[in-house]
Image (cartoon, rainbow, N blue to C red):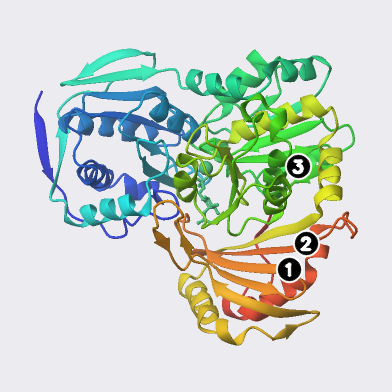
Amino acid sequence: MNVRRVPTTPIEGQKPGTSGLRKKTAVFMEPGYLENFVQSVFDAVGGLDGKTLTVGGDGRYFNERAIQTILRMAAANGAARVLVGRDGLLSTPAASAVIRARKTDGGLILSASHNPAGEDGDFGIKYNIPSGGPAPESVTDAIYRRSLEVGEYRILDAGDVDLSAAGTRTLGGTCVEVFDPVAIHAGIMRRLFDFDAIRALFASGFTMRFDAMHAVTGPYAKAVLEDELGAPPGTVLNGEPRPDFGGGHPDPNPVHAGALVDLMMRPGAPDFAAASDGDGDRNMILGRGTYVTPSDSLAVLAANATLAPGYAGGLSGIARSMPTSRAADRVAARLGIPAFETPTGWKFFGTLLDAGLATLCGEESAGTGSGHVREKDGLWAVLFWLNILARRRESVHEILAAHWAGHGRDYYSRHDYEGVDRAAAEALLADLRGRLAELPGRRHGPLSVAAADDFSYRDPVDGSIARGQGVRIFFEENPRAVFRLSGTGTAGATLRVYLERFEDASGALGLDPQEALAPVIAAAAEIAGIHVRLGRTAPDVRT
Ligand code: VG1
Ligand code: CO
């Protein structure tokens, strides 16, 4: 078979954001765009000669076409072997698990996570390193630099590889191994959690709904929850992956998974519910009449971790992203283990996990995970909760209330202003950064500013530094407001405002979060001039 060398020109705007490269699907489908990025990855990691790669995606529109292109390019670049999930499907955590279990030289994951899919939607691709985690900035920068200078890409003149059944095929000199995407991941879950206890919980009549949102987790959730743990058929909702995710927005939050939240707030609701995102790395946790914020979820998992066999020996440390509430820090302090605060994005947890400094990690955006893989893992979090529920035999609400009664409550909400003018949003942040020194001492309603900074992080393992990771405003009375711009959008800009306030165990623990946070919300809007600068009076999404 013939290797073609096709000239390629640098394409504007390939700098990967918080998590890989994301663009409109139409951009990825432009001749040479995907190819330029893929060749840049291969070149930036020192070529593919004799190497083994893992490839799979969340099943969105263009998933299989992109994989066929990547396979031909991997073959033309001399790869020895490529592992591909059947039908080209692999959730992000499953891809991480396969890279680790099979010790491949990294992998390519095709996903734009929770961003809507389809011809008019978004597409994305990211390279994960051999540890199974997202590439650190040193690697993404090298890929970006290469994408600006790469002169040609190599591709094999060959037909499509059959991905519809497990088995081994050859493509030029490369072995393409198609495998069952569910098995490796399910095997890890079986070792970490008390499946017998969870089976007994379902057998006792415990009811649950898992909303896969027509994205990649459906097959994983059905195999584990229904087939293996005995949850009745119908427990998994929207379990068939579709190229357009059923026209939905698979972001597991109270707005985009609103139907599930409504179901759980009605009389006669199931005991437990969860939802996952497009690529299966996030989770939303609900109990009957109860929404668990992702920050609280991380804290509850950490406080109850020893109930799960995989964590029975205790935790080495807990890491959270900076905008995540400080609830997990309180658990770490109680357990006498270190707490880490990292910038937004899972890649920052990798070094801590590799070094064994942290066992559990979490982000306020509904990502939780542990050292079992190097990505956040939606189904893992759901099984962890089920393990805790099975062992404690209390409701989600009771577990949460007991947690607050023991540790106090961090009232928390994230306000997103979506699709705003990029220049206006950047000006808002730049202006805030310019005024950091003037803010302390200022009063805003009942609150006065104690300190303000722009978060920067020094990785305790490799010493790398990440600056400008978000403006933090601390108030005397303990609340905190954080401002940053999303790095995962593809149109305009999204301003994220993270708001929190702590109430100790003797305080009011049962307030509505938006009411409890009202003074912080008002102070944040005033300090940043949100309404004037963005022309918006309210956020689009509150989580
Ligand atoms: C968002 C979340 C962040 C998460 C990232 C990728 O980033 O806030 O916590 O790590 O998405 O998650 P941003 O820059 O838009 O705030 V996923 O599920 O898209 O891989
Ligand atoms: Co995701």
Could you tell me how many numbered marks the image carries?
Answer: 3
- Labelled pair 1, 2 in contact (Cβ < 8 Å): yes
Pointer 1 with pointer 3, Cβ within 8 A: no
Kindly identify which residue carries mark 1.
479
Q: Are marks 2 and 3 in contact (CB under 8 Å)?
A: no
Circle 2 residue: 502
- Label 3 secondary element: helix
- Beta carbon of the mark 1 residue lies under 8 A of ligand 1: no
Q: Amino acid at mark 2?
A: Phe
Q: Residue furthest front?
A: 336
Amino acid found under the numbered disc labelled 1: Pro
Location of residue 109 in the rendering, given as x and y in whole percent from the top left corner: 39, 37
The residue positioned 89% from the left and 60% from the top of the image is 507
User: Disc 3 marks which residue?
Assistant: 261
**Viewer-closest of 109 and 329:** 329
Indicate the quadrant where residue 158 lies. Answer: top left
Q: Please tell me how crowded label 1 is: few (under 14), some (14-19), or many (20+) other residues with Cα within 10 Å.
A: many
- Which label sits in the foreground, 1 or 3? 1
Q: Which percent across, then down, holds residue 46?
A: 19, 42
Q: Give the image quarter of residue 442.
A: bottom right
Q: Note whether residue 537 is visible.
A: yes
**Callout 2: SS:** strand
Q: Is residue 7 left or right of residue 534?
A: left
Residue 198, horizontal then vertical, whole percent:
73, 20
Upstream in sequence: badge 1 or badge 3: 3
For the C terminus, which image quadrant?
bottom right
Nearest the eye: 290 or 446: 446
Q: What amino acid is at disc 3? A: Val
